Amino acid sequence: MESQPEHTVWVNGTATSSGPGMSVAELVREMSDRQTGIAVAVNQSVLTRDEWAATILTAGDRVEIVGAVQGG
């Protein structure tokens, strides 16, 4: 069985390989040890958490994953 080709997406400005059909939710699980307190934008559009699983990444997408921090 042949492996599926990888697609390159940009995550926080860094080229990252992702498998075809990867959702934003899967990418967040791969890239972050946190699942709460974060916001995600794809191609400059902020996604709600409910949209993560339904948003499939395509080659060249630009993803920003931002975590909230406490402090003053």
Image: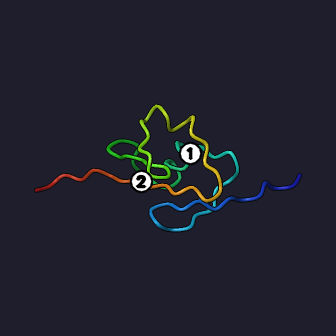
The answer to whether the residues at label 2 and label 1 have Cβ atoms under 8 Å apart is no
For badge 1, the amino acid type reads Glu
Give the x, y percent position of residue 11.
Answer: 50, 60
Q: Name the residue under label 2.
A: 65
Report crowding for label 1: few under 14, some 14 to 19, many 20 or more residues within 10 A (C-alpha).
some
In this rendering, position of residue 62 left or right of residue 72: right
Report crowding for label 2: few under 14, some 14 to 19, many 20 or more residues within 10 A (C-alpha).
some
Q: Which residue lies furthest to the left in this view?
A: 72
For badge 2, the amino acid type reads Ile
- Residue at 71% from the left image edge and 59% from the top image edge: 6
Q: Name the residue under label 1.
A: 26
Q: Is residue 14 above or below residue 35?
A: below
In this rendering, position of residue 5 left or right of residue 1: left
Q: For marks 2 and 1, give the CA distance.
A: 13 Å
Q: Residue furthest right?
A: 1
In this rendering, position of residue 58 left or right of residue 15: right
- Residue at 49% from the left image edge and 34% from the top image edge: 51
Instruction: Tell me the element at label 2.
Output: strand
